[in-house]
Image: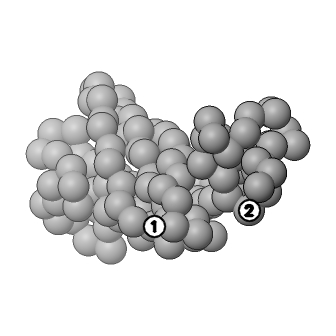
Amino acid sequence: MLSKICPTCGVTEKERVFIKNVCVNCFQSNRVLSSFPKNLELLICPTCDRTFFNEWQELTEDERAALFVEKGKFVYPLMKFEYTFTKSKESREYSFTFFFDVEGVEVTRFARVLVRV
């Protein structure tokens, strides 16, 4: 049986998993897997750390991260996501890793969200 060869990078299916006719790496880099609104605003009080989302409320970082994920549109089923964040006086930056199921293969995508405080 002939081995598949990725038309983009030349790797074979013996070296890497394939999705359709391309390797998983080329599939990830050449496909839109998710999209988010250009302006995604979330207000966080610099004094009490409460979040304004329809009203002022106390949210954990997990709950804040989930608000961003809920605003996303995903082409393939989202299996899970992980995030980290850095905090300063003026902002927070969330770095997300999304894990998608694409025809039985786990594909990842990275995204950053900056929140003004």
82 sits left or right of 100 in the view: left
Calculate the distance from the C-alpha at mark 2 to the C-alpha at mark 1.
Answer: 19 Å
SS of the residue under disc 2: loop
Reading the image, the residue beneath label 2 is 20
State which quarter of the image contains the C terminus. top left
Q: Residue 66 is drawn in which quadrant?
A: bottom left
* Amino acid type at image mark 1: Leu
The numbered dot on residue 78 is: 1
> Which residue lies at the image location 35% right of the left edge and 61% below the top edge?
80
Q: Is the residue 5 above or below the residue 62 in the image?
A: above
Density class for disc 2 (Cα within 10 Å; few <14, some 14-19, many ≥20) is few
The numbered dot on residue 52 is: none
Residue 35, position in %: x, y?
62, 60
Q: Nearer the viewer, residue 3 or 75?
A: 3
* Amino acid type at image mark 2: Lys
Residue 23, position in %: x, y?
70, 46
Residue 50, position in %: x, y?
18, 54
State which quarter of the image contains the N terminus. bottom right
